Amino acid sequence: MAWDFRRIEEEINEQRRRSLYYLILMVLVLALMVMGGCTLRERLGAGEQLEEPVQEEFEDPLAADVTVPPEQEMVKVVLYFLDADGRYLVAEAREIPKVEGIARAALDALCEGETEGELSSALPPGAEVLDLNIKPDGSCVVDLNLEATKIPGDDPRAEALAVYSVVNTLTEFPTVKSVQILVEGQNRKTFAKHIPVDTPLLRNLSFVKS
């Protein structure tokens, strides 16, 4: 068998070229991988530097601005309540919020009957002011509901105390000289059964404890 040395040499050279080619290719791939990795790390590093942690802001309810409503201006009035024995009226000075129509506000407070100690309202429970009008001549017309006339015990004195608790409270105001009491918009002869209210009433301190 004859050896073809030329052919063998060519095959060896071909194998060397292929090996060199693969070697160069691997070097290039490794170089690209190294360069790509550096670039990626740089980009990630730059991103970490640029992106600062976001701090969430929480509103402290204790530190928040609180709008405090303006303090209500008060005004002193004098109301006439029933004493502990239920025989006389007692003048009580009280401060109530200053509003337009202060005379009606005072009468509303009288009907509510909220007092300190043993005083109480001379008007029966459920009494309400329906309307109140003070005229330029000093006469005051006050309209009470029907419940205000339901005096317990059909007692003339208790009826008089109820009527003059209203009259005396209103005439504490300098603009009020007399008081005309209506019931449900009607002018009645008596408040319940005994005390006349068909004409304007003047201030009467005979029922007030001295």
Image (tube, rainbow, N blue to C red):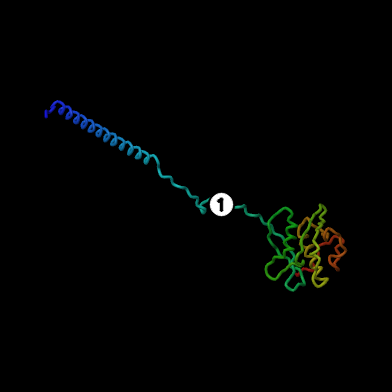
- Which quadrant does the N terminus fall into? top left
Which residue is at 14% across, 25% downward? 6
Q: Nearer the viewer, residue 180 or 27?
A: 27
Q: Nearer the viewer, residue 210 or 39?
A: 39
Q: Quadrant of residue 138?
A: bottom right
Furthest-front residue in view?
1
Report whether 172 appears left or right of 48.
right
- Helix, strand or loop under label 1: loop
Mark 1: which amino acid? Val
Estimate the x, y position of residue 19 in percent, counting from the top left.
Answer: 21, 32
Furthest-left residue in view?
2
Report whether 37 appears left or right of 115.
left
Estimate the x, y position of residue 23 in percent, counting from the top left.
Answer: 22, 33
- Which quadrant does the C terminus fall into? bottom right
Observer able to see residue 181: no
Estimate the x, y position of residue 152 in percent, counting from the top left.
Answer: 79, 71
Which residue is at 76% across, 72% downward? 86
Pointer 1 residue:
66
Q: Within 10 angstroms of label 1, few (less than 14), some, or many (20 or more) residues?
A: few
Estimate the x, y position of residue 131 in percent, counting from the top left.
Answer: 79, 56
